[in-house]
Image: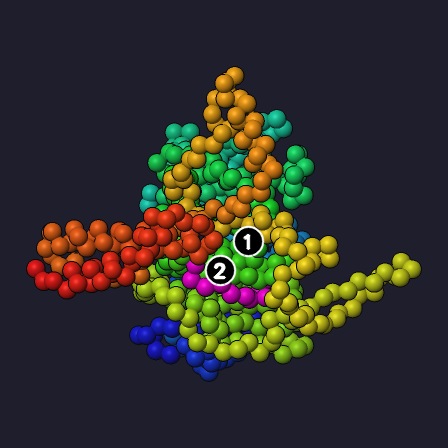
Amino acid sequence: MMSSTPTPFISCRGTHGVQVFEGTHFQPVEEFKNESSKTCRLAMWSPDGKYLAWANGTVVSVAETEKWSVIATFPKPKTSGLQFSPKGNFLVTWEPYQVTKDIPVNTPNLHIWNLQTKQSVKSYVQKNHSKWEPSWSKDEKLLSRNLNLELQVYEVDKMDSISQRSDASLKISDYSTSPGYSPYFFLCYIQGSKGQPSFAKLFKYPNLNPSGLVASKSFFQGDRVEMKWSKPGNCVLLMTSTDVDTSGASYYGKQTLHFLDVKGTSAMVQLPRDGPIYSVEWNPNGTEFCVVYGFMPAKATLYDLKCEAKFDFGTGPRNSSFYNPLGNILLLGGFGNLQGKIEIWDTQTLKLISPMDAPDTTHLQWSPDGQHFMTSTTAPRLRVSNGFKIWHYSGGLLFEHNIQSPNELWEATWQPMPDGYLKDFKVSTKKVAGIKPSQPQGANTFFCIMIISKIIIYSYSYYFILVSKELYRPPGARGTSAILKFLEEREAPSNPKAVKPVEKGPSQVKPNKRNERKIKKAAAEKSSVPVESSPPIDTTGITSDVQFELTGDETTDKKLKDLKKKLDQIARLKAEQSAGKKLEVNQVEKIQKESELTKQLMELSLKKK
C-alpha cells in the first residue's frame, strides 16, 4: 500500500490476536506480522493513522503504518489502557494501581512515552479506573489532569512543573478541554452539596479562576455529566444524569441537556418528549447537533446553535446517531436490545436515503471517506456470529468477514485519516449493488435460564426466527381494521418551523345566549354522524421533478419561475391526493393542467437570450 494514495485500514482484535485488512479490497495486509497472542488486551490507532499500538500481556508494541515495521516496544505487561496524543508524538500507557511486596506504595502506574526518543517524559500515580486518561490540547502544547478535585495543567515541554492550577475554592469533579487550538477553554463540573445546585463553568486558559470565567450554568439534577464539544471547539453540550428519577417516570433516572459556548451563551435544550436521552452527536461542521431521546419509539431531532429545532426525524426504534466525517450524512440506528434498524439521512436535503437492517450489531463506525461504514458483532456482548461487515451508505453490503467458532472478535476499527484526506462527494439515493449476507437476517441467539430446585442451569440455544411481513394483531382485532396503539403513536418526519394553518372551529366561537344553542346542536350532530377524516399530511419539501435552465432574459426567466412555482403546487396537491385527502374542484382542475404547464415551461427554456 503506497503512502502517496492512502487507503484506510481495518484492525481486528480477538482470540486470534491482531490482524489488519486493507480498506479497498478488504484483504489481509501481508506486510503486517499478525500478533497471534490470545491475550491481546488492547489495540489502538493514533489520531492521524500513522501508528498502530497494541498490548499483548507481555509488551506494548507500536508499528508505523507505511511499512508496518515495529518502531518501539515498552515492557509494560499489565497495561490495561492506551492513549495517543492528538498528533501521535506521545503514547500513554496505564496499568491498574496496586501495592504488593515487589511494588511499593505510590509507584507510578501511568507513563507518557515520547515515540521519537522511546523514553518516558512523565509518570504519576492514577488510581481511577474510569477517566484515567490525561487531556491534551489539539496542538499538544498543554496536558491536564484532575487530581483530588483540582485541575492541573502542564506545558508539554515543561512537564516537571505545573503551569496552572484551578482556584482552590473550586472542587472540580470532572472537566473537559476544548478540541481546538489556542485560545484554550476548560469546561469544569462542580457537583453541588446536598440541597445546593451543581455548576458547569467554562474558563479561558490561563485564568482558571473567577476572572477567567466565560460562561456558567447551574442545575440541580446532576449526579454525573457527559461533555461533548463541537469539532471547531467553540460550543459544548453538557448532558446531566441522575441515578434516580424522583418523579418515578423512568427506571433509568433522568437526563437533561445544556448548551454553552465560548461567547458566554448558556441555555437548556428543550426536548418536547419525556424519557431518557440515548444519544447526542455534533455534526462535524459544528453548526448543528442531533439528539435521540424519549420513551420508545424514540424521537430524533436536529438542533441549531440557538438550541432551536431545525428538523424532526419522527419516532422509531432507535437509540444511536452517527454523522459521517463530512457531516453530509446522518445515520440513526437502534442497537443493543433493539433489532438493528438503520436509517440513512441526507443532512442537506433532510430526506431519507435508505432504510436497512443490521441485526446483532454491537459496534458501528464510519469510514474516513464518509461513504462507507462498518458494523461488527463482538464479544463479550455476543459470543456467536462474530465478525464485521462493510456497507455503502445507500444500503448495499460490500464485504463481510466472519470469525469461525470457537474464536471470538473483540474489536474492529477503521484507521483514522488526517482531515486533508476528506473529499466532498454528492450524496445519491441510487443503491450500490452489493452481496447477500452469509447469515439469515433473522438469526438470533438466546440465553436460556432454567431454575430447578434452586439450581440455576445455563445453556445456549440457537434458533432461526422467521419474521412475518404482516402486521401482528391480537386475536380480538383480527379480521378488523383496528390499528394498534403503538402505530398510532408513531410520528412522521416534519419541519418544526413550518407554518401550520389554524382552522377556526365552533369551539373557538365566543359563546353567548344567541349562539350557545347552535353550538350545542352542531356538536351533537358531529358526535352522531361519523365523519371520515384524513390524517395531517406534511408536504414540506415536495417539488416538481421538472428541471430547466434560465435563459438570461429577465422577462422569460420570470415566466419560467412562475410556471415552476405552479408545477410545485401541483406536485404537493398530487401528494395529498395520493395520501387520501379529498381535493376541491378547483384543485383537481389545477392538476389536470400539469402537462400543459410543463410543455410551456420546456418551450420557454429553449429560448436563447
How crowded is the residue under tag 1: few (<14 C-alpha within 10 Å), some, or many (20+)? many
What amino acid is labelled 1 in the image?
Gly
What residue is shown with label 1?
Answer: 316
Estimate the x, y position of residue 427 in percent, counting from the top left: 35, 63
How crowded is the residue under tag 2: few (<14 C-alpha within 10 Å), some, or many (20+)? many
Residue 216 to residue 21: above or below:
above
Q: Nearer the viewer, residue 463 or 251?
A: 463
What residue is shown with label 2?
Answer: 343
> Residue 523, labelled with which disc?
none
Residue 312 to residue 417: above or below:
above
Q: Mark 2 near mark 1, Cβ–Cβ under 8 Å?
A: yes
Where is residue 294, by image quadrant?
top right
Please report the bounds of the magenta region as a residue range. Answer: 352-362
Estimate the x, y position of residue 215 in percent, counting from the top left: 41, 33
What amino acid is labelled 2 in the image?
Glu
**Residue found 57% across the figure and 73% down from its top:** 387
Estimate the x, y position of residue 389 in percent, counting from the top left: 52, 72
